[in-house]
Image (cartoon, grey):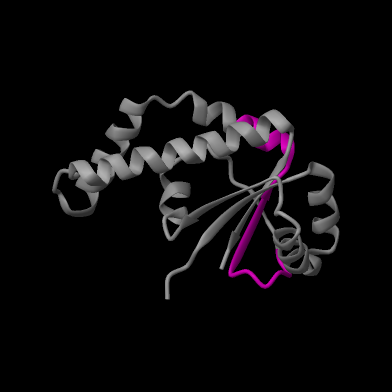
Amino acid sequence: MSVQGLFYALPRHGLRALLVEPSAMDDYLQRSAEQGGPLAVLDQGSWWQQDMQRLPEIEPGVAVEGTLAQHCWAWPADMVNDSAQGLAAISASELVQRMHAWQKAQDGAPADIDALRHWVRRQAALRSFWQAAAQRRDAVLLYVV
């Protein structure tokens, strides 16, 4: 069974309420999905952990206990803005260099072109998600199930 990481962009005041009562988070996310969803959702699938390890520009979020998720982290709006700025500063060539370095550290082999393309596309989607959340002054939640 693979572990899925879902990023949610939430109104910043909504995150505050969920942090006060984290057990309500699961119902909130389920109810929001039925009503058209939160402001934005990005499914990073099983890649979420690698993304978080390879992108130090995303500041560590605040761990949230008391949910049904395997892991849950929250980023208030000011941290979302800082992380979005850091992500925006990364060039595509730097992303490719990071992937090459990671692959070489894993097994010494160069990354294949399809893996590089997939990595760059996922990072573009992730950067776009964080940028849009920062522009709306949203909070972000990483919910791992």
Q: Is residue 29 left or right of residue 102?
A: right
Query: Residue reaching furthest left?
Result: 109
| Residue located at (74% from left, 33% from top) | 137
x, y (%) of residue 30? 71, 66
- Classify the position of the C terminus by image quarter: bottom right
| Residue located at (84% from left, 45% from top) | 13
The correct choice, above or below, for 142 with respect to 132 in the image is: below
x, y (%) of residue 53? 44, 48
| Residue located at (80% from left, 67% from top) | 24
The correct choice, above or below, for 55 with respect to 35 in the image is: above
75 is within the stretch colored magenta: yes
The correct choice, above or below, for 9 with respect to 66 in the image is: above
Q: Which residues are magenta?
A: 65-82
x, y (%) of residue 138? 73, 39
x, y (%) of residue 124? 44, 35
Q: Quadrant of residue 118?
A: top left
- Classify the position of the N terminus by image quarter: bottom left
Q: Is residue 66 left or right of residue 105?
A: right
Q: Is residue 99 left or right of residue 137?
A: left
68 is within the stretch colored magenta: yes
| Residue located at (41% from left, 43% from top) | 122
Q: Is residue 47 left or right of residue 137?
A: left
Count up the numbered dots. 0
The foreground one among 145 and 103 is 145
